[in-house]
Amino acid sequence: MRKYPILLIIVFSLLDILPRAENPNGSVVAKDNEPVAAEAGTSTVSAEKALNPPAAPADRGQDQLRNLAFEETNPDFSFPGRKRRYFYEGFRQGNNIALTFDDGPNPQFTSPLLSLLREKKVPATFFLLGENVRLHPQIVKEILESGCEVGNHSFSHLNLGNATQEKIREELEKTQAEIRKACGIPPMLLRVPYGASGEQVARAAFELKMDPFFWSIDTNDYKKTTTKDDIVKIVLKDAKGGSLILMHDNSQKVLDAVREIIDPLRQKGFNFVTCSELAREVRANQSQKEKNQEGKTNFSH
């Protein structure tokens, strides 16, 4: 990811006629209070280095924290235990935020968006559909060479919350295989369609060693009635430290909105990073908090 370090009222989407549930404060939630979705610098690096850059000495410990998260001998996938594996946002007390884009790669809009991100030196995370990767594998390489990262968004945009374990594994593994074929290695990030998760999805993500990411800001860009100005207003109003911003790289209004939010967000002091970097920051701070608590406990004894 570049040279700097790499997370019930039913309404219907006018775009895909799929349900969304909204909580009282306006954020989108699903079963188990898991969110529901309607779903970059100029230098060129190899696909493998972009997805897995060499860790700096300070980063190796953070990578070890990620490895430890997948080494539990008795993982809990029940509710609410599984939620501690999910990333809804980054470190709130920091200034890092992440732009994320779902449903690509899109032959019409992904490349122009990447051009903008390279121009502005903004890394981002693209959660890809396996069926689209199969059709446009060259765009996967372009994403990585632009200093961004890729994640798994299922193969066919199936609601995995209602699927069998067998079907869940099929959707995720097929997408892993397509992305591996396109760029050499599979991603380590997952965003399930509609944010529809559950015990079987959490188990599959754990077994495939993928971090599940949701979001803290839903731009509602999937709605036909949402304009470019609406997207800009939502992001600039709600952005805070650790924000995970959900968008889709499939429309001109999103491309135009991204062009308008980058500079104002930087002027507010925010730093753009990938989801992987948000996760590293969360894990590092949680680890430090646990060490501090352990030290207090030992001191009290």
Image (cartoon, rainbow, N blue to C red):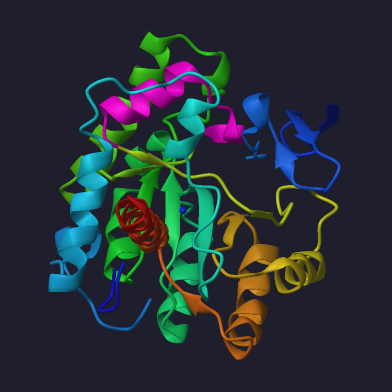
Q: Is residue 204 left or right of residue 113?
A: left
For the point 42% across and 30% down, which residue is it? 155
For the point 76% across and 29% down, which residue is it? 17
Foreground pick, 112 / 55: 55
Q: Is residue 257 above or below residue 164?
A: below
Which quadrant, please, contains the N terminus?
A: bottom left
Q: Is residue 257 left or right of residue 172?
A: right
For the point 70% across and 36% down, which residue is it? 29
Q: In terms of secondary structure, what is the magenta stretch mainly?
A: helix
Write the start and end of the magenta stretch as one range.
192-209
Residue 293: image location, x then y, percent: 39, 54
Is residue 207 inside the magenta stretch? yes
Q: Is residue 204 above or below residue 7?
A: above
Foreground pick, 296 / 9: 296
Is residue 210 inside the magenta stretch? no
Residue 130: image location, x then y, percent: 38, 36
Q: Can see residue 284?
A: yes
Q: Is residue 213 above or below residue 48?
A: above
Q: Hey, which quadrant is residue 124 in on the image?
A: bottom left
Residue 266: image location, x then y, percent: 57, 86
Residue 108: image location, x then y, percent: 52, 59
For the point 55% across and 48% down, which residue is it? 88
In the displayed image of the protein, which residue is found farthest to the bottom? 267
Q: Hey, which quadrant is residue 123 in on the image?
A: bottom left
Foreground pick, 126 / 142: 126
Q: Can see residue 52?
A: no
